Image: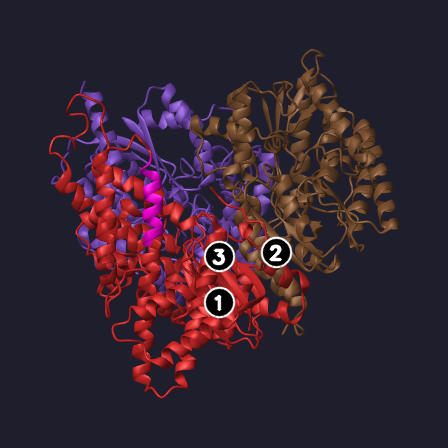
Amino acid sequence: MRYAVGIDLGSTTTKAVVLDEQGAVLGRGITNSRSNYDVACEVALAEALINTRFSLVASGLARSGFTEDARTALLGELERRFREQQYRHQLGVLDTVLAEQLEDPSIVDATRAGVAAVVAGMRARAGALFVEGASRKSDFFRDLAGSLYMQLAEEHARVHTPKRSCAAGDDGGAPRASLFDQLVGLYDKAILEVENRPTAAADFDAIVERALAAMDDAAPAALKTSVEVAAATTLDEWAKVGTGYGRQRLPFPEGCIRSEILCHGLGAHTMFPDTRTVLDIGGQDTKAIQVDDQGIVTSFQMNDRCAAGCGRYLGYIADEMNLGLHELGPLAVQSTRPARINSTCTVFAGAELRERLSLGERREDILAGLHRAIVIRAMSLLARSGGVSDEFTFTGGVARNAAATGALRRLVTENYGPRTMNISPDSIYTGALGAALFALRSGRSGDGAAAAAARDGAPVETIP
Amino acid sequence: MTHAHDDLSGLLSHAEELYRDTSFSAVRAWKRRTGGLALGFMPIYVPRELLAAQDVLPVGLMGGGEMEIIRGDAYYQSYICHIPRSTIELGLNGSLDALDGVVFPAICDVIRNLSGMWTMLFPGKLVHYLDVPQDFDPAVGGAFYRDDLLHLSRKIVAHGGRPLETERLRAAIVAYNRANGLVRELYELRREQPWKVPTHELYLLLRAGLVVPVDEQIAMLERYLAFVEDDDERRPMDQARVLLTGSFCEQPPLGLIKTLERTGCYIVDDDFVQVGRWIRHDVPTEGDPLDALVEAFLHDAIASPTRWCESEAKGADLVRRVEHSGAEGVIFCAPSFCDPALLDQPMTVAAVERAGIPWTAFKYAENAGQFQVIREQAGTFADSIKLWSGA
Amino acid sequence: MSAPSVVPKDASQDRQKRMIAAHFDRLAEVEERGEKAVYTFVPGNLTELLLSFGVAPVLPEINALQSGMRGLSKDYIARAEKDGHSEDVCTYVKCDIGMSRGGNVGPTGKRLPKPDLLLLSYTGCFTFLKWFELLREEYDAPTAMLHVPYQGGGTITDAMRKYVVDQLKSKVIPALERITGRAYDEDLLSEHLARSAKAEDDLVHVLESARHRPSPIDAYFGGVYYIGPIFTAFRGTEDAVDYYAELRAEIDERVRLGLGPVTPDGELEKERYRVVVEGPPNWTSFREFWRMFVDEGAVVVASTYTKVGGVYDNGFRHDPSRPLESLAEYCLGCYTNLDLPTRVDMLSRYVTDYEADGFLINSVKSCNSFSAGQLLILRQVEERTGRPGGFIESDLVDPRYFSAANIKNRLESYFQMIEQKRSRGDAR
């Protein structure tokens, strides 16, 4: 079957949406962005195609005699096993890359032993990450492997570091990096290479086979058949359009690149056809967009070069408070007396936060104030773009944050009256969906340039 | 509107109430009572005497303080100062509905352009850009200024105000001479005995005076003077005497002024709320009063970064003020992105340095809520001054 | 201001290049020749009056923008900031101060003369006042202030005109007489003004040629070259008259041949978008900025920046029969001296008259005279014309404020939006 794909290369994540020829969503994929944009796009697309094949498996299984509950359980386990196998494969690549690095003769044996111990530990714990009900802070290999590696490296270094040598220069010699620092340094270098290597982690056939084999009970025949059918389905790229923050360097030819503003407008329109105003708060930028009844952009505004008030700002705050990004919203909604915060300048965020904490203000109240400050900045972009019309769709990473959506809802109502505010659970894919729709159009119109060039691939520009 | 402020704290809380009331209820009440017009004016200087003579209440607009800005930011890029944002916010949220118009004196390009924005945003309201002359020859700049004032006066009449009459203008000058004289008296008292006139109190009185008729302002100033002159509870402390400069348009938050005082500074001279101090002495009450106002503007006004200084080296006036006030150091305290203050600063800093006067500098926005950095900086500065003068 | 040699170049461009080079050469020799140098500003410049006294005009704004184009401004600005100038303020000023402290070597590598007079034509920009106060401290030179009142009510009143003329008579002319020892010669001034009017006719003809489809000129990026001579030291000279006559003939020929504008990368072959631009360009990445338009097939058909040194397309001409009055009206009428409602009128008229697809605002950090209020201008012009407005942000000569990726992103989105609107209906 032929598909059209849209890829949204953002500052933190890269998303892909795959559509069939009728425009129905077949699959979605996401990965963390990385220095090699081509690989990021390739991985996102591969993930979206895996997601597509899982959809095919699901529809195959639906024609079997299993109850819905049983199907859900089977598919759930298959997917967990699939992710585990994918993870183990990536771990193998990491091991290889680390081994290559250890060939450097200047590395001492203690470090080699440390790496071996840590990698062994990671392999041993891989299964636990994917047991039923296990919570994972992220689904990206970089995050999963990274946090485990750090934890194990720290434990290893604590046990194996001689007491005296960790303090810098106390033997009179030059300061030496501690064992832990050396282990971390090796990982940091290795993960960059692992990430930017075209990977076989997306080889559906091989991985799904191992996943089936690893299931607790033998996989039922209907599941095996559905998997075989899904795996055997040929998926041909018909047309491709790229968009996103990294758009200037997207690995697509010129005719296949669309502005993220247009993509967000069209994506939001498709998700919620009555949308007239779109707000997107992403990692690096905030966009306020007005669209007409066909999803065509009529006006837009973006933040200036300063990233104050964008998702990245919340990232700084999370780092400063030693919290995960996803923990901020839930804490902030517990506030009873939100602090008044007038600056969303990332440069001063840390200092202001520390001062407020030192004055005894509650974390929740400060966080609630920060969320409100971010939303107020977005409000001014909305006003510049032409206000907030009904319906209003909120997209981007920050749309998943309850404190931000709550503040936005209040401010919009106060300033523009009641508005239907749409937030899709798939809102992170809005830009990619719009891009996919543009791809579909070019496919349908037989736009040779967009479609053919997409198939041929284009030269890739890599940022070192 | 007289309030029961029989004691100092009552008077001050009344002043603070007027200062904090961004909905200008005192102005609304005055309009209900008198049926007169009220005209807002942006900082630095407009001849309030002219407005008062036409039964117009002049209302000083000094920004929105710590007010949260929701709509105003939509009109300004990040590199523009804060006061126009809050002024627009006040206009759009209805706080300034009681005003029949606004006078925008020539301060800088941001305030200048705000006058045109006001015309577009609030059609039907009186908008006047008061382009005060930078030529101080009575026959040239003076004639132009006089003409501009008459133009403003005619616009007031067209909006339903009383025509300008010579004797009423003279009476208004007398009243403002009294009010401005009291302000000068307070500044003198603070210079001599800064412990008696804390700047955060003086500041509240100046701000309160911007939203009430002149006779009410006179009454408040007289009461305050009477209270503090006899107050022996207020005793000198070991504080550094500083002159604060640069805060003539967008005002610092009250918290900043209090922070400076708490960190060990006596502010013995400043640039806050200059409208009543722009003219250095009483405006003469003999002869043609309009001519007298013009002449006072041309030849008796303070040096200001917004005013072309014809011959003197920049900063000479600041050094004189330091000497007169007995300040031991200068704090350059300007709003972020304030062109007049910040473009002037390298020249005035150089003058202060040449004179061997210690100085420090920082910037603020009217809505700043945290003063830790300023507290540390000002505290260190005050300590170093005290060490220096003790050595 | 030179284009690369591989692309078609007009004779007028060579002529302008020679004129500018000769001017800087002359400035380098002012002291040796016993001439006098007068520093002044582009808006409200009194070039004809200066020429009638035989003094050499030096324009710090031009030096700053030239320094920006030649990659020198970054270090000059750093120097000024190191010396205590705020990062918040105008970078033209800091560039100039930095240049002066580094030995006052001009953008062409030749020394600039010290000012014998700072002629502060205070027109449409508050910063001018501070700029010359700062220069006065640098050079200890006499300063003549010409306060040009702002058109706060949207019109030039008799009182304004009289005020400017009175200052010319009582301040500016006596100051020029003092430094030159020459008497004011009104006949000579009128001769210069007559030549100005002639060149102004040709300039307007050139700017209005953008009404054609395709437009034979780019009225913003190309426009800054066209206004060069008339905005600076050449208004009122024979050189300027010749330059504009030649330019006019070249443009007429392009119209006849149906050609688009000449850009640094060659001739623009297909005009895909016609836009009006408000605000000054960025000078440090001028080429790159222009190329972003060229890449999209976008042509600027009218701009307000090309009116900062004089608005001529409303019919104003210097008038030899009323020399001082017409100089006053010239000063009062410069673009940045217009109030915001008038600016909205003018932009809306440009969008309609030049059949533009939309308009773009380049908001520069340095210049509050332009920038403060532009977001309201944007909304107002959109409402008036029904055409979409775009908003980008940069600076005049501070390369730190030119984010190419951000600007390109906005421009591409903007042009794609216009494209999408055009194909509305058949898009689905």
Which color has been applied to chain B in this rendered view? purple
Return the residue nearer the eye: A62 or C3: A62
Q: CA distance from mark 2 to mark 1?
A: 47 Å
Residue B269 falls in image quadrant? top left
Q: Which callout, 1 or 3, points at the residue further toward the start of the chain?
A: 1
Q: CA distance from mark 3 to mark 2?
A: 48 Å
Label 1: state its secondary structure: strand
Disc 2 versus disc 1: nearer the observer: 1
Return the residue nearer the eye: B297 or A108: A108
Find the residue positioned furthest to the top: C32
Where the N terminus of chain C falls, by quadrant?
A: top right
Neighbor class of circle 1 (other Cα within 10 Å; few <14, some 14-19, many 20+) is many
Drawn side of residue B130 relative to residue B345, left or right: right
Report which residue position mark 1 lands on. Answer: A17
- Identify the residue shown where x is 38% and y is 64%: A207
Q: Which residues are magenta?
A: A91-103
Which color has been applied to chain A in this rendered view? red
The amino acid type of the residue labelled 2 equals Pro
Q: Position of residue B192 (x, y in %)?
A: 24, 31
- Identify the residue shown where x is 32% and y is 80%: A220
The residue marked by circle 1 belongs to what chain?
A
Label 2: state its secondary structure: helix
Q: Which chain is brown?
A: C
Q: Are marks 3 and 2 on the same chain?
A: no
Question: Any magenta on residue B297?
Answer: no
Report which residue position mark 3 lands on. Answer: A41
Res. A460 mark: none
Neighbor class of circle 3 (other Cα within 10 Å; few <14, some 14-19, many 20+) is many
